[in-house]
Amino acid sequence: EDKVVQSPLSLVVHEGDTVTLNCSYEVTNFRSLLWYKQEKKAPTFLFMLTSSGIEKKSGRLSSILDKKELFSILNITATQTGDSAVYLCAVKAVTGANSKLTFGKGITLSVRP
Amino acid sequence: DGGITQSPKYLFRKEGQNVTLSCEQNLNHDAMYWYRQDPGQGLRLIYYSQIVNDFQKGDIAEGYSVSREKKESFPLTVTSAQKNPTAFYLCASSISRTVIGETQYFGPGTRLLVL
């Protein structure tokens, strides 16, 4: 059974702090790993990672994948209160002609002023 | 505006009642999905559809049914057989289920509560 584990489950920081969110996985026929940000409603797409060691960056957010050790991290620098959300990690695996997305439980980040 | 819409935002269900959640997309995506999200849990796949008039069970399909009569619409019915329906339901779509690397886009969700 495919498994995605995120840690920590929740995190409280102060504005300006840097945070690192972790995602480890065990899947068969891995294809890509995705990070989403969920603020009360629809998850919004952040990054998709398919290759090891190549950092994806968007403003204060960055992410990298290690396919040998089967994990990814999402970094947020100079955090702001608007970064408060649930961060979801999902792994795409392929079975025959179909693909499947398995989600972790999410990491709840609270950024205090 | 292109996107995915879900309605209603909140839905109340009485014992023994079937209720239907709406999901519409105008992104011209082939694939559509229904997920259930419970507190402290990740998203779990209920049903998915790759093309019109075809759909497949996900990991937790029992007590749910779907239809895909039109490309843009994928309604989910929560039947009376679903004993614990209280949850946040998310609909998503993607260009194709089989294209490697394609991303799913989510609707705003429907929160279902049992009276």
Image (cartoon, rainbow, N blue to C red):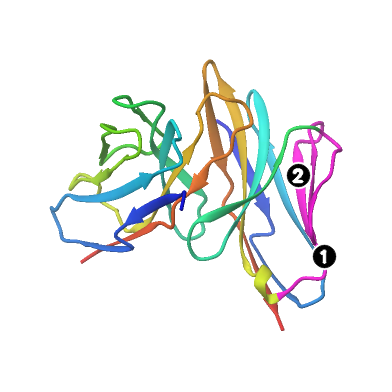
Question: Residue, x 82% and y 65% (percent of image)?
Answer: A77
Determine whether the residue tagged by mark 1 lies in a helix, strand or loop. loop
Q: Position of residue B52 (x, y in %)?
A: 33, 27
> What chain letter is assigned to the residue under label 2?
A
Residue A25 in which image quadrant: top right
Give the farthest residue toward the right. A53
Against B73, is B97 above or below? above
Q: Nearer the viewer, residue A68 or B20?
A: B20
Residue at 51%, 33% (x, y): give it. Answer: B95
* A60 w.r.t. B90: above or below: below
Q: What residue is drawn where x is 48% and y is 61%? A: A41
Distance between mark 1 and mark 2 Cα atoms: 16 Å
- State the residue position of label 1: A77
Q: Is residue A113 above or below residue B82?
A: below
* Amino acid type assigned to the residue bearing label 1 in the image: Thr
Q: Position of residue B110 (x, y in %)?
A: 35, 58
Left or right of residue A110, residue B61 in this image: left
Q: Are marks 1 and 2 on the same chain?
A: yes
Q: Position of residue A103 (x, y in %)?
A: 56, 44
Q: Position of residue A91 (x, y in %)?
A: 62, 37
Q: Quadrant of the C terminus of chain B?
A: bottom left
**A65 and A4: which is toward the camera:** A65
Q: Which mark is residue A72?
A: 2
Residue B98 is a magenta residue: no
Let me know if residue A60 is in the magenta part: yes
Specify start and end residues of the magenta stretch as a single range: A52-80
